[in-house]
Amino acid sequence: MFFSPFFVPILFMFVHQNSKALLVVFLDFDSQNCTGLRELVTEFMVDMKGEGCVSSVKNKLQTLDGVKKVDVDLSNQVVRVLGTSPVKILAEALEQTGRKARLIGQGVPEDFLTSAAVAEFKGPSIFGIVRLALVNMELARIEADFSGLPSGKHGWSINEFGDLTRGAASTGKVFNPINDAKEPVGDLGTLDVDEKGEAFFSGVKEKLRVTDLIGRSITVYGTEDKSDEGLAAAVIARSVGVGNNCRKLCSCDGTTIWEATNADSVCSKV
């Protein structure tokens, strides 16, 4: 059972939040042509019963670095956060208020239809979620969470194809539509994985159009220089933008968003 193709990342996020260690990884901004995080609207459905819940949620979120504005729609149980704070941090803050929360959208409000994409790594040994959100037509914000990787440095990239018939080996070359030999657009730099096999990334990438990425793949390599065929890959799929996913009921079996569990989705070790 699935609520939508975008419900799996939510479950992954809430399983991983129990980890005691958080490793923040950044791309090499100079070599990878990246800049600081840009503002997006991140949308959650939160189990709120009244104005007391609204105040609690607002007060908690407004203390976070990077949060510029918090809007709450109590009738629809929707919370929209404008700012640069990563999804992981926002989700953990909402959980700390004692209320159930589910990520339902992210992106630029002015461009709902093509504002977000997601890639899921479903194991059997490497698990992860990568979210890509449009900031403008030449800039994408990227957030990633991985577990099950060998410790050390690993190259990762957006590759040409979403063909996983031979795993990462059939995903083609690094996505490079402008044929830049020095800095391919799809080169995401290096992940620094801790001794638990976990890595977290939050940053932006210039010249990357989310609309061009659907159906391609993200590959994580065993080496920093991407000289091997790759350890794992996941296809990039269209995700929900802001304001498009306020459903609380699954159309397939009638389960509510609050009743769903990890067993309803893919298995995850994260």
Image (tube, rainbow, N blue to C red):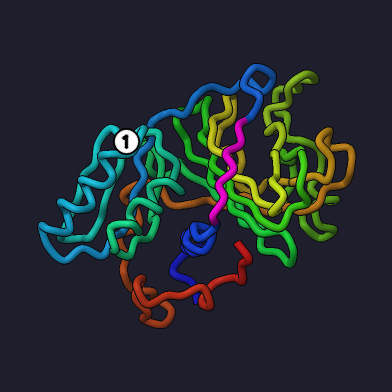
Image check: 79 left or right of 188?
Answer: left
Q: How many marks?
A: 1
Q: Residue at x 51, y 64 (%)?
A: 15
User: At which x and y percent is residue 217?
Assistant: 69, 47
Q: Residue at x 64, y 29 (%)?
A: 27
What segment carries the magenta color? 20-26
Asked whether 24 falls inside the magenta stretch, the response is: yes
> Is residue 110 in sight in this rendering?
no
Vertical placement of residue 142 versus 180, above or below: below
Q: Main secondary structure of the magenta part?
A: loop
Q: Nearer the viewer, residue 197 or 207?
A: 197
User: At which x and y percent is residue 181?
Assistant: 80, 20
Position of the C terminus by quadrant: bottom right
> Is residue 234 in sight in this rendering?
yes
Residue identified by numbered label 1: 67
Q: Residue at x 70, y 39 (%)?
A: 192
Q: Amino acid at mark 1?
A: Val
Q: Nearer the viewer, residue 13 or 248?
A: 13
Image check: 79 left or right of 204?
Answer: left
User: At which x and y percent is residue 250?
Assistant: 38, 74
From this viewpoint, which residue is outermost toward the right?
A: 228
Vertical placement of residue 148 versus 65, above or below: below
Q: Residue at x 59, y 70 (%)?
A: 266
User: At which x and y percent is residue 52?
Assistant: 12, 58
Image check: 215 left or right of 74?
Answer: right
